Image (spheres, rainbow, N blue to C red):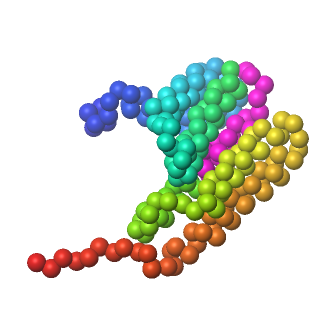
């Protein structure tokens, strides 16, 4: 009752899909290609791709905090497409699709959100230095190396691990001082009436 009143039909369908996918994996149904799951993953791809297109604005490519989120979300849509194709019988390694999701979408989104939240919650301007833009780019390269290069060379995993590690080291170099530094922290002031 609460969900039907609070959510529109589109959100109820997305919630249903969001529950169906983890259940399919938890029960083992997703371990072998199944036509029903192909339909489910194609629907997820369509929903995520539509959302991605609707969110797009040309100006986001000038703001690293935005393009990093946008590209990471694109990997989520691509992972759904990859799973749909695999469940449809296309000879595609599920491992590559899983890495599109885990390296591209999850790690990309986590890195971008940590960068954004660390700035915003400490009162700093939402502008990242060039080194963090490079960290975001390295995470995208790590994903490409892990998903595409293994099709051609065994070096893909090593190149991916190197890019992934460099991206996170750049992040740590810039963001590790933030939790221990209170020089930029803006605290709310107590107003006496």
Q: Nearer the viewer, residue 70 or 40?
A: 70
Q: Please give left or right for residue 167 compared with residue 51 in the image.
A: right
Tell me, yes or no, whether the highlighted magenta stretch contains residue 91: yes
55 above or below 123? above
81 above or below 165? above
- The residue located at (70%, 26%) in the rendering is 86
- The residue located at (15%, 79%) in the rendering is 192
Residue 25, x across and y down, in percent: 61, 37
Residue 76 appears in the picture as rendered: no
Look at the image and tell me in which quarter the C terminus lies: bottom left
The secondary structure making up most of the magenta span is helix
Residue 63, x across and y down, in percent: 52, 50
Look at the image and tell me in which quarter the N terminus lies: top left
Residue 170, x across and y down, in percent: 66, 64
160 above or below 45? below
Q: Residue furthest left?
A: 193
| Total numbered labels placed on residues in the image | 0
- The residue located at (87%, 36%) in the rendering is 152
Quadrant location of residue 172? Answer: bottom right
Q: Which residues are magenta?
A: 89-108
């Amino acid at each position: 009752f609460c969900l039907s009143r609070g959510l529109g039909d589109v959100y109820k369908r997305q919630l249903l899909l969001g529950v169906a996918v983890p259940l399919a994996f938890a029960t083992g149904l997703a371990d072998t290609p199944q036509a029903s799951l192909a339909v489910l993953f194609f629907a997820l791809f369509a929903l995520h791709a539509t959302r991605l297109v609707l969110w797009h604005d040309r100006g986001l490519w000038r703001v690293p905090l935005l393009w990093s989120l946008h590209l990471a979300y694109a990997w989520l849509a691509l992972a759904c497409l990859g799973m749909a194709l695999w469940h449809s019988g296309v000879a595609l390694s599920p491992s590559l699709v899983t890495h599109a999701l885990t390296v591209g979408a999850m790690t990309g989104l986590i890195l971008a959100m940590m960068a954004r939240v660390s700035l915003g919650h400490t009162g700093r301007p939402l502008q990242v230095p060039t080194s963090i833009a490079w960290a975001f780019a390295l995470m995208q390269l790590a994903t490409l190396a892990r998903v595409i290069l293994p099709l051609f060379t065994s070096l893909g995993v090593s190149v991916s691990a190197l890019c992934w590690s460099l991206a996170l080291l750049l992040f740590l170099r810039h963001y590790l001082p933030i939790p221990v530094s209170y020089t930029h922290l803006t605290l709310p002031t107590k107003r006496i009436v």
